[in-house]
Amino acid sequence: MSKYKMHLLVCGGTGCRASASDAIVENLKKELNNQGLDESVQVIMTGCFGFCEKGPIVKVVPDNTFYTEVKPSDAKDLVEEHIIKGRKVERLLYKDPVKKVTVSDEEGMSFYKKQLRIALRNCGFINPENIEEYIARDGYMAIGQILSENTPEEVIEIIKASGLRGRGGAGFPTGLKWQLTRQTKSDQKYVVCNADEGDPGAFMDRSILEGDPHSVLEAMAICGYSIGADTGLIYIRAEYPLAISRLLTAIGQAREFGLLGKNILGSGFDFDIELKYGAGAFVCGEETALIHSMEGKRGEPSLKPPFPSVEGYLKKPTNVNNVETLANIPAIILKGHKWFSSIGTEKSKGTKVFALAGKINNVGLIEVPMGTTLREVIYEIGGGIKDGKKFKAVQTGGPSGGCLTEAHLDVPIDYENLLAAGSMMGSGGMIIMDEDNCMVSIAKYFLDFSVEESCGKCSPCRIGNKRLYELLDRITQGKAEFDDLARLKNLSEVIKDTSLCGLGQSSPNPVLSTLQYFREEYEAHIIDHKCPAGECKALMVYSILEEHCVGCTACARACPVGAISGERKLVHSIDQSICIKCGACFDKCKFDAVLVQ
Amino acid sequence: MSSVKIELRKDQVDKIRQIAKTFKNDPGELINVLHKCQGEFGYLPAEVQEVVADELKMSVAKVYGVVTFYSFFSMIPTGRYPISICTGTACYVRGAEKVLAEFKKQLNIEVGTSSPDGKFSLSCLRCVGACGLAPVVLVGDKTFGRVSPDGVKDILKEFEEM
Amino acid sequence: MDLVKLNIDGKNIEVPKGITIHKAAKSIGIDIPVLCYMELKDLNIENKPGGCRICVVEVEGRRNLAPSCSTNVEEGMVIKTSSLRAMNARRTVLELILSDHPKDCLICAKSGNCDLQDMAIRLGVRKIPGQEFAEMSTYRLDTSPSIIRDMDKCILCRRCETMCNDFQTVGALSAVNRGFQAVIAPAFEMNLEHSSCTYCGQCVAVCPTGALTEVDHTPDVISTLNDPTKTVIVQTAPAVRAALGEEFGLAPGTLVTGKMVNALRRLGFNYVFDTDFAADLTIMEEGTEMLNRLTKFLNGDKDVKLPILTSCCPAWVNFFEHQFPEMQDIPSTARSPQQMFGSIAKTYFADKIGVKREDLVVVSIMPCLAKKYECQREEFSVDGNPDVDFSISTRELAHFIKEANINFMELENEDFDKPMGESSGAAVIFGTTGGVIEAATRTAYEIYTKKELPKIDFEELRGLDGIREATIDIDGFDLKIGIAHGLGNARKLLEDIKAGKSHYHAIEIMACPGGCIGGGGQPLHHGDSKILKARAKAIYKEDANKPIRKSHENPYILELYKEFLGEPMSEKAHHLLHTHYFDKSKKKFQI
Amino acid sequence: MNKIKSLDDLKKMRAQAQTGINVREKSIDPASRVQVKVAMATCGIASGAKEIMDFFIEQLDRRSVEAVVTQTGCMGYCYAEPTIEVTLPGQEPVVFGDVDKKRADQIIEMYIKTGELVDGIIPVNYRTIDK
């Protein structure tokens, strides 16, 4: 076995590394070497501990002592005190700001683990292609339990009492949805799992389906039992081939084990599941559009009412839940609604999975209790902003959401708070933006998406989004007028107010929220013809700094339109009327003589 | 949507009929049938849609209406190595546009078209869910992560030699 | 009936449960504008996509505005139809629609008769913000023999799609593409001509804008009328006289037969004839064919094709050629009245007045757009000279009359010319659903039984139900009759025949709702089915007023047989008055 | 496989699965073996997880290490794909990120064979519902 008796784990996450973890490792090694301990104590650089706010972190194994805010100069004390004398270095231990006590070990520090995995409980633990591993982790116990102990009504009561709300967007109470579908009388009902994860930047549903497909199957069966359905359908994006193959394997195994099919666990309850494939239409995430798509039609949404709980797939009562919502169900059944409702905020219970992406260090999937703040998510789990840049905004809720700013960093995340701040929970994509991102361009990007993905059925969404995009485009080109801001706002509000479905009702959100929080950036584009973030190409001006130019002619040769003139060894100049702002001169100049403004 | 005019061989027609049959000639299974057909032919030419409509007892106009609704379906043959650039938010924020521009420049083709030799075709897609690797490029089944404009040449080279 | 209480614009009202806000408002005199919504009440046609969003209203407590055309009333609702928020939204939505619509109203075929134009007038739109930078969605102009598709003007109300698919089950049109590029088009956005379109024109009849219009043949007619070498004769279909008046402000259902004849004379037609004459001729041929088949059937012939289907509706003929080619031998081989008229005019009548075929021009005034295509069919021409040269619609005639400075309202009544202007009441009712079969029954009964009909009116064959049936006692033989109007209804009857489940002896089919009175070439009904009912009533009134009410009693028809054709189904009759059908299902894809 | 016919059957099945007795390999107790789990979700595979998994299977076999290599789903560390989790008998699992062949070789030689830690450890920064 290991020759080392002790390990010093130094956080090498990007956040900690920025605050000198490299130097800490170096000093620790030096110190150990000096003490002749380099053969028995090993220093290891690890990934992010997720406690970046108090970084750099050093953890001592095997006694699991946890040191925070360590400086390179602390290396000596750590080695001499902790390793040689076996005494903890009190001043580097974490002090609980509330209880005012010092915490030394990881167990006591567990609160630093901001993440709590419920929906992701099995992802990364089990082999998703082996049903036995799922069973070993209490898989299918929830359906087993309710089939033998609970009436459908009781199950619905449990889900209602748990406070679980839809994780796909609007946050409709799941138990209530089930109850509504149960109440509708019909010879045939359907359970539909919405796995048409279309928000760019969100991939939690895919991860759950790839990592823990059985939990979704089990939840669908529980739902089927509760509402009185014997058929489940999973509407999944064709762009997710791995998730599809894992699901098919899982369904096959569950059938083989008798956990899907006729007379499940001898209860007399029949339930089976089929896949339906999407084909690349974002709007199909909207449940009526999804249902039309499953029926082989164009995925155009239709008016509600009738709600799917009354008239859904093939005109039968249909309960549509998204993947993450379903993944919570077995845990709620097994651990009880009280446990679940003890997590989260007053109106938003449980946890939410977020997909962190953009200019953040720890891009990835996280799951946190509702009520966690954006700051905790970005700085304590996400490892902060990439390359030490300044945080500018976070976009939540995908194309339907809005941008939140620094002012919102301490807002507890839940459905109501995000909505109040002009964004929404959506499916849980979080795109982090730094100072280099132009907010007008971001709004334009999302509008481009909405224009592309609008189904075209209703006029405000079909034409209105196009007009919004055109306005934003003119702003980024410096061609807009001041009045256009008022138009932008009115148009956005009318589109929200009059569109047929959720897509159009929320597509102007990125415009409205950036207009609200970054108005000065819009004004800079319009009035000063400048893009403060330097992203809008049309607004850039390339010029040559006389004092740097050596007249090498490299830029003139690189210019594709011949906008640069000047004699050899003399200062060159750029004709702004010809320049197409391609940046070729800037790239070519070796003397930093090309200035971009 | 424009389409190349082709003549279906009898075995190809039979194949479509067989696909339709596995879905019980149910018009409700249109999307699944189209998926299978696109898997078979690589794209969905008008002639294939006509047979599908016939088999599912629905109008060709409705079939075409569905084909043109979903971005996954194409009526243009793709290249042997279809290149898809993810333009999802995470990729966008990390510079997917520049990568796309580089592909266009290198191949001298526009999005939605193929190179004259039929080797490469270029398309954009929305979020493949590999945001951790942004920007992401797919060539056929192969995924390339953290692609920079400079890396485009190397990706193309990998397939040039094949 | 359950009632709900609600408040609209400050008024407390009680309305039946299950009705929409739009209807509830209408009941107290509040007229919320609608654009995409359309309902033809008695015909079971409803287009309710909730797509245009013009009719949005504010419902207290709701986050978004509600489309009043498709939101049902609920107990306790408080609705504001003209709040600032609702009005601003309505105006902005209309501006958006207009921003993607051509502004060539002055020269648009629909000008003055356009729902979108009316809406712009009603809301007083004077400016479309940002129009100068707004991209417009544009599409290829598509001209077919009957219909022009100018989809730049499409507002995606989906009415045409509803008619083409749900009501007609023709399936030539569908919504295609997505988002800003979304449009209604045939498969592959090919020309209508290459699709399964039957030219029934119901898409044109419901289109709220100039996106779908008829091909205008008036200019051809005008130049022919001004050609001194030509003798120009005109025939008018029965449904025209019951609707033409609407174009001049008369109440729907006002018969204007006499004024119309006068106007046509003033326009310069050398002879003003009546398609009704040919309708009587049709009854002689089709009725005889029916009797022949029935007689064979009663004599035990197992191969005889029954039921016999009428063949006077050209859209219906197109329909079965496309969709049921294997059933070509079931419909009667009799040509439609328009074509019988042309055929007789260019032979019998041309001889009679001593004009060469090529110097005789036959123009038809039809409630129909499929007639434009029908008269261009190759089989209805001799050496490239068509039996009917031009077919113009009721709407085109109205425009023509106005353009020619004729004050229609002041015109005296005049009579049709003889011989081809004389007709029976039986011919008049060809213009409405059930009329052809009633006319045929009147004649078949008397010929078969050799007795006089005890009662001429067959009320049991009339009405607006999509599929109707009746059993007529013909001297002990129970003649089972089926009637369908609307091709979707026709399809049901055809499927039954195909499955061997049909128990009818004869079936009448008309493609348009209500028959020819609701044809694609008629004055626009703008979604008011009361107009169709009024036209039907007028047609039956004209029948009742006619001195002769059975086709076989029309003296000029009898003379025609005596002088020229011999007897019904004679070889000559067969050559001039019957036709054959084609399999058009196997069309190869072409744009 | 016989169908699970009742809740009791399911409980038995769970107990059996939990003791780690793999039905397919009844004779060997995997608890005494090294377990390597490779995160094989789309991101992982795109970053080369398949090759890493093959590498472990081949090399562990070649270097005569008794080990079970399995796939699992996304661990959430997209920034550090490919990610693997190694469990030595009787010890807590350790997650390694950014595993290329070089690091995989180190993991086998140092961590698996001798228990020495190597760079690239990702500390578990979440709670699970079991605790």
Image (spheres, coloured by chain):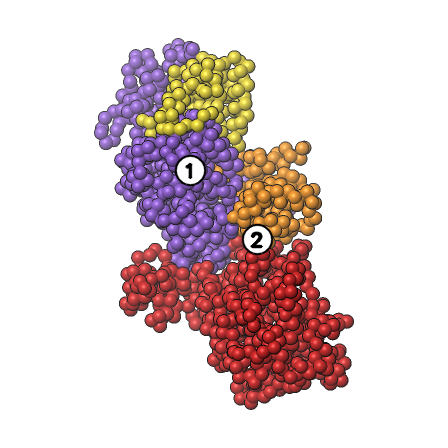
The residue indicated by pointer 1 is A271
Q: Where is residue A317 in the image (x, y as percent from the top left)?
A: 40, 48
Query: For numbered disc 1, what is the local secondary structure?
Result: loop
Q: Residue at x 45, y 12 (%)?
A: D114
Q: Judging from the image, what is the letter of the chain drawn in orange?
A: B
The answer to which quarter of the image holds residue A586 is top right
Q: Position of residue A587 (x, y in %)?
A: 57, 41
Q: Which residue is drawn at 35% across and 40% down?
A: A226
The residue indicated by pointer 2 is B58
Q: Position of residue B68 (x, y in %)?
A: 56, 51
Label 1 neighbourhood size at 10 Å, few (<14), some (14-19), many (20+)? many
Residue A321 in the image: above or below residue C161: above
Q: Judging from the image, what is the letter of the chain drawn in yellow?
A: D
Query: For numbered disc 2, what is the local secondary structure?
Result: loop
Q: Judging from the image, what is the letter of the chain drawn in red?
A: C
Which label is found at residue A129? none
Q: Judging from the image, what is the letter of the chain drawn in purple?
A: A
- The three-letter amino acid code for the residue at tag 1 is Phe
Label 1: chain?
A
Q: Residue at x 59, y 54 (%)?
A: B60
Residue C590 in the image: above or below residue C509: above
In terms of depth relative to the viewer, which is nearer, C62 or C308? C308
Is C327 left or right of C438, judged from the image as shown? Answer: right
Q: Where is residue C114 in the image (x, y as percent from the top left)?
A: 51, 71
Label 2: chain?
B
Q: In which quarter of the image is the C terminus of chain C?
A: bottom right
Q: Which of marks 1 and 2 is in front?
A: 1
